[in-house]
Image (cartoon, rainbow, N blue to C red):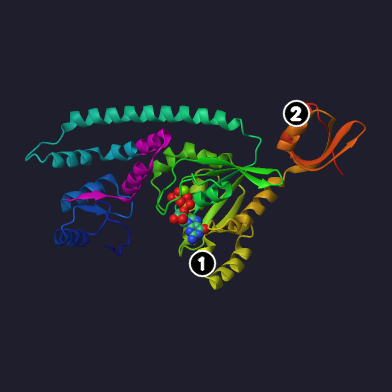
């Protein structure tokens, strides 16, 4: 059911006549649940329930429900529970009414003020506890993260179902990455080390998908997870090129990124699922995007080669900020030599005057560490 209206009615969202229409519709269809594709205020939800006699769910509650079903890790579960409790708090009176109805008592009185107060206190207590625990999880993750600070990091972000996990799966050759044709298949961030070849590596992180009108509680409680985004050197904004509405989806993602304080991050736009776009359309899209968003690549996760443009772009970016150096170390220090090959992009190796001389690309941080380990480094011409 839709309605043209200047602005939603503050007490019933729909206009008065529409509410009556809705009531008739419910009776005619014998419906037991009403879902609104928008967020309702607590009183709007209650008033519509009172007027129709049926359970009302708004967009936020529905999204929270889906999240609750998908949550796997204890962190994701805590984040969802926190968001659900925050959603519930101002709606407690109504939630109680459902409970009473469910028990089926005739003339059962409401819980009364004192019971409501108790519940409110309990919920507030639980919210505090969850926030505390999530804070601890976040701290331990920061410790983990500091261990991999040296590496070049990229985060996959984008609208839900855009193909983020498929890209991680394809790039990492890892079938354990969960992919499914459903909303919010991924809730927990997942990081894989991706070998780009020529000893260039990137830490690629998959994140929860965004959606239009994402409930605010949810954004807030997933902030810790999405901090991965703020840690990244580069954001890979995945856009489903086969979706008729990809432009709006892109705007939504940009908005959420701005809310997360990540609007200034370098972004590479990754147009995905191009195998599902008709050829002429794709050609036109490439031309248009080439002018609009020059820093973009077109990929498909369906074939190995389909991801090559992304590999090349990542390689180029990973190389920026690295310089070509000449490295000298004593012949025979196999351990040090192995470390160099592991951490730098070695281009050539010779021996001169009892020393191994390497030409290699490496970031400052690695150069500093190798110098400490006994390698002599000078800028190569
Ligand atoms: N045709 C085609 N389908 C794809 C491609 N990449 C992903 N898909 C399909 O799109 C759906 C969503 O893919 P996911 O990788 O799970 O998407 P996601 O962005 O991780 O989704 P969420 O985790 O829910 O946010 C799945 O059914 C995939 O099989 C592609 O390159 N081509
Ligand atoms: Mg996913």
Residue 224: % across, % down: 48, 36
State the SS at label 2. Answer: helix
State the SS at label 1. Answer: loop
Farthest right residue in view: 353
Circle 2 is placed at which residue position? 335
**Label 1, label 2: how far apart the Cα atoms are:** 50 Å
Q: Is residue 125 above or below residue 26?
A: above
Q: Residue at x 38, y 34 (%)?
A: 78
Q: Is the CB of mark 2 within 8 Å of ligand 2?
A: no
Q: Residue at x 26, y 62 (%)?
A: 1
Is-magenta flag for residue 309?
A: no
Q: Residue at x 46, y 40 (%)?
A: 188
Residue 119 figure quarter: top left
Q: In the image, which disc is placed on residue 277?
A: 1
Q: Residue at x 61, y 60 (%)?
A: 293
Neighbourhood count class around disc 2 (C-alpha, 10 Å): few under 14, some 14–19, many 20 upward? few
Magenta extent: 54-83
* Left or right: 280 as drawn, with respect to 43: right
In the image shown, does 174 or 292 lie closer to the viewer?
174
Residue 292 figure quarter: bottom right
Residue 73: % across, % down: 42, 36
In the image shown, does 8 or 279 lie closer to the viewer?
279
Farthest bottom residue in view: 280
**Disc with the residue nearer the chain's start (1 vs 2):** 1
């Amino acid at each position: 059911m839709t309605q043209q209206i200047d602005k939603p009615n503050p007490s019933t969202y729909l206009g008065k006549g529409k509410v009556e229409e809705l009531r008739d519709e419910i009776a005619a269809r014998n419906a037991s649940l009403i879902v609104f594709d928008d967020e309702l205020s607590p009183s709007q939800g209650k008033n519509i329930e009172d007027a129709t006699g049926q359970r009302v769910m708004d967009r936020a509650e529905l999204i929270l429900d889906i999240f609750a079903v998908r949550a796997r890790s204890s962190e994701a579960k805590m984040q969802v529970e926190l968001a659900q409790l925050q959603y519930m708090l101002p709606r407690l009176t109504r939630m109680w009414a459902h409970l009473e109805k469910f028990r089926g008592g005739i003339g059962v009185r409401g819980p009364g003020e004192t019971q409501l107060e108790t519940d409110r206190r309990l919920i507030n207590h639980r919210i505090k506890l969850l926030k505390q625990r999530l804070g601890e999880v976040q701290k331990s993750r920061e410790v983990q993260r500091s261990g991999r600070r040296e590496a070049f990091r990229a985060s996959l972000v984008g609208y839900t179902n855009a193909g983020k996990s498929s890209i991680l799966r394809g790039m990492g050759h890892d079938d354990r990455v969960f992919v499914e044709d459903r909303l919010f298949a991924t809730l927990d961030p997942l990081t894989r080390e991706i070998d780009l070849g020529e000893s260039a590596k990137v830490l690629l992180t998959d994140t929860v998908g965004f959606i239009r009108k994402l409930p605010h509680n949810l954004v807030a409680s997933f902030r810790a997870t999405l901090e991965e985004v703020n840690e990244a050197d580069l954001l890979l904004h995945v856009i489903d090129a086969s979706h008729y509405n990809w432009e709006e989806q892109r705007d939504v993602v940009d908005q959420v990124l701005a809310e997360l304080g990540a609007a200034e991050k370098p972004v590479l736009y990754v147009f995905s699922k191009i195998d599902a776009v008709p050829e002429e359309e794709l050609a036109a899209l490439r031309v248009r995007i080439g002018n609009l968003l020059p820093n973009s690549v077109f990929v498909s996760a369906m074939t190995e080669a389909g991801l090559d443009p992304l590999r090349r772009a990542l390689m180029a970016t990973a190389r920026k900020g690295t310089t070509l150096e000449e490295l000298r170390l004593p012949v025979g220090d196999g351990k040090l030599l192995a470390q160099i090959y592991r951490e730098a992009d070695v281009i050539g190796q010779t021996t001169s005057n009892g020393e191994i001389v390497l030409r290699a690309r490496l970031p400052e941080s690695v150069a500093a560490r190798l110098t400490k380990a006994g390698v002599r480094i000078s800028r190569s011409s």
